[in-house]
Image (cartoon, grey):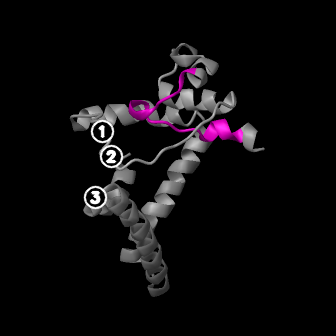
Amino acid sequence: MRQKFAPAFAAACGQFIAFNRDAYDKIGGHTSVRQEIVEDVELARQDKTKRAKHHYVRRSGYDVNCRMYQSHHELFEGLRKNFFVGFGRNLPLFLFMAAMQIIVFVIPFVALGFGSPQQKMIAGILIAIFLMQRWLLDLRFKWNPLISLLQPITILLV
């Protein structure tokens, strides 16, 4: 089962993807994905499909960095281009994941403001868990923890 579904969950960030020569040749390099819009994710899928060794490496952000977009317009266009294609143009999967993002990151904030006392309590617990998880990542990667509070708004905008 894992081998069958693993390529569907492949991910990569093109600015920070690296291969050794054997693995790159085994998947056909960039030639094998030249028709793809999101070639980095497709390279990761090829990597998993052809069973080359695939590792995700956590780094602090100080080793390398990249600024992908310089304006709101560039950000919007980049996300618009990548999101649906990044889900393999699978509309049910894309809509499911969008709904999950809203359920997990937006609805608890709405319930906190407009829910019954019991719903507010549950929403508060869910928000606390979400913020703890995000703040641990912020601490680990030295990100601004206040940005985590904007995630529900970001989800709605995307």
Residue at the (36%, 65%) spot, across then down: 135
| Residue kind at label 3, given as amino acid type | Ile
What's drawn in magenta, residue-wise? 5-21
Give the left or right position of residue 95, taking residue 152 as reference. Answer: right
For the residue pair 40 and 99, the one nearer the viewer reads as 40
Residue bearing the label numbered 3 = 147
Image quadrant in which the C terminus is located: top left
Q: Residue furthest left?
A: 71
| Secondary structure found at label 3 | helix
Q: Are marks 2 and 1 in contact (CB under 8 Å)?
A: yes
Q: Does residue 35 appear anywhere in the picture?
A: no
- Image: 55 above or below 121: above
Q: Are marks 2 and 3 in contact (CB under 8 Å)?
A: no
**In the rendered image, which quarter is residue 21 located in?**
top right
Residue bearing the label numbered 2 = 61
In percent of width and height, residue 66 lies at 29, 36
